[in-house]
């Protein structure tokens, strides 16, 4: 708990250098994705059925890549929106890619036919798309928008199957099993039980003081993580009986040498490992870290990639961690430049990086 409460990477005592060395991850084996987008990356998503990666970009395109066993990649398909693409996700069977964007539309790309079609529309940009599987019902697409609505879509029909009115604009959303968590403007969080998807199960204020940047559900659907613009992450359980296990911690902060000031960066992405249940955070400081929420411990920290990280994802078995490096506008337009890196990197995962450490028995 004490470590989670401090700055990521900061430790005290004579063994600090050794401890940091043991927790320092290696980026030397990371492989760059071929033919990356031409503008900032907004979202990335791995298929749950194959080694394919979808990458959404502000250049209005979604690119689909096939990843080989050696980590090399080849572009397989590309399709376009009429505005920047803000979110992308795969269907459960891996046959389709869905995306939503600033053009207020969601599009579906069918890998077999190689064609894309518009399948959803909102009054304002679509900020997030996910697939859901309500109990005893067919798989559906859910789209969250700045028009303060969630819409549920049966892709066999043109009109939404249902619309859920929200208190504020959708900034982020995630789904795991029957749990859907929606992060809204004004630090509101809506929790939806997909057994009853047309009603909000619970509304809570964010446990963090500043604007919500990302929410990510635990794989077991018992709770979720929240990241804010102020370099903090919160672990939150849905059941009030587990509220004593809720906590938050500082991350993605740095103290320049010789300065009393702390630089604070946005937490842009949180991804859970599909096997171990550990998770990553990535931020505007250009670093990512792996954490164990149950042990309240950082597993690994990584050096700066020399560019902000706007999106991350684990592949289906957790052997690859993908992270995008491109400008996230966190410092305004004046910090953007033609030479700013735009790339997606593939980091091979070793067990000691993301696997929880065995509990130490106290004598």
Image (cartoon, rainbow, N blue to C red):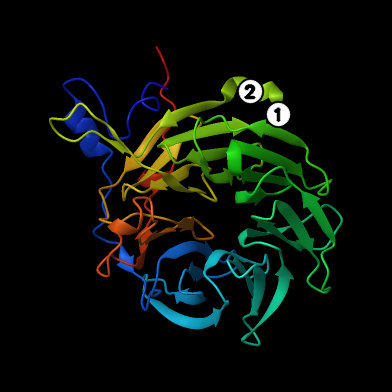
Q: Is residue 153 above or below residue 229?
A: below
| Residue at image point 42% right, 36% down | 230
| Residue at image point 70% right, 24% down | 240
Q: Position of residue 327 (x, y in %)?
A: 35, 60
Q: Is residue 259 above or below residue 331?
A: above
Q: Which residue is mark 1?
A: 239
Q: Which mark is residue 85?
A: none
Q: Which mark is residue 243?
A: 2
Q: Position of residue 328 (x, y in %)?
A: 39, 56
70 vs 14, nearest the viewer? 14
Badge 2: few (under 14), some or many (20 or more) residues near its Cα, within 10 Å? Answer: few
Q: Which residue is the extreme one toward the top? A: 363
User: In this view of the protein, can residue 354 be seen by the observer?
Assistant: yes
| Residue at image point 58% right, 33% down | 206
Q: Position of residue 228 (x, y in %)?
A: 48, 39
Quarter of the figure that contains the C terminus: top left
User: In this view of the protein, can residue 218 be seen by the observer?
Assistant: no
Q: Is residue 20 above or below residue 159?
A: above
Q: Is residue 328 above or below residue 35?
A: above
The reply to whether dot 2 and dot 1 touch (C-beta < 8 Å) is: yes
| Residue at image point 34% right, 58% down | 333
In the drawing, does residue 14 fall left or right of residue 323?
left
| Residue 265 position by quadrant | top left
């Amino acid at each position: 708990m004490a470590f989670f409460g401090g700055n990521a990477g900061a430790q005290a005592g004579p063994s600090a250098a050794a401890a940091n060395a043991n927790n320092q991850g290696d980026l030397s084996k990371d492989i760059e994705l071929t033919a990356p987008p031409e503008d900032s990356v907004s979202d990335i998503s791995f298929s749950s059925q194959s080694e394919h990666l979808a990458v959404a970009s502000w250049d209005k395109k979604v690119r689909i890549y096939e990843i080989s066993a050696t980590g090399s990649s080849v572009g397989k398909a590309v399709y376009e929106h009429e505005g920047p693409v803000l979110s992308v996700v795969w269907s459960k069977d891996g046959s389709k890619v869905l995306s939503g964007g600033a053009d207020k539309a969601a599009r579906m790309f069918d890998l077999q036919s190689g064609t894309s079609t518009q399948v959803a529309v909102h009054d304002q940009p679509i900020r997030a798309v996910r697939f859901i599987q309500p109990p005893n019902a067919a798989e559906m697409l859910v789209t969250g928008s700045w028009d303060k609505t969630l819409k549920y879509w049966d892709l066999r029909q043109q009109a939404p199957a249902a619309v859920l009115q929200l208190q504020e604009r959708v900034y982020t959303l995630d789904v795991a099993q029957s749990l859907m968590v929606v992060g809204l403007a004004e630090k509101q969080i809506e929790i939806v039980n997909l057994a009853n998807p047309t009603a909000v199960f619970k509304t809570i204020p964010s446990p963090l003081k500043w604007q919500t940047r990302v929410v990510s559900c635990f794989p077991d659907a018992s709770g979720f993580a929240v990241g804010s613009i102020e370099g903090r992450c919160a672990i939150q359980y849905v059941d009030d009986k587990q509220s004593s296990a809720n906590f938050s911690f500082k991350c993605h902060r740095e103290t320049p040498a010789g300065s009393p000031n702390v630089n604070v960066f946005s937490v842009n992405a949180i991804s859970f490992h599909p096997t171990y249940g550990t998770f990553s955070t990535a931020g505007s400081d250009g670093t990512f870290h792996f954490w164990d929420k149950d042990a309240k411990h950082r597993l690994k920290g990584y050096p700066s990639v020399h560019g902000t990280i706007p999106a991350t994802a684990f592949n289906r078995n957790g052997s690859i961690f993908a992270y995008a490096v491109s400008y996230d506008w966190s410092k305004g337009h004046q910090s953007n430049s033609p030479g700013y890196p735009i790339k997606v990197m593939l980091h091979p995962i070793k067990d000691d990086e993301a696997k929880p450490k065995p509990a130490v028995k106290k004598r």
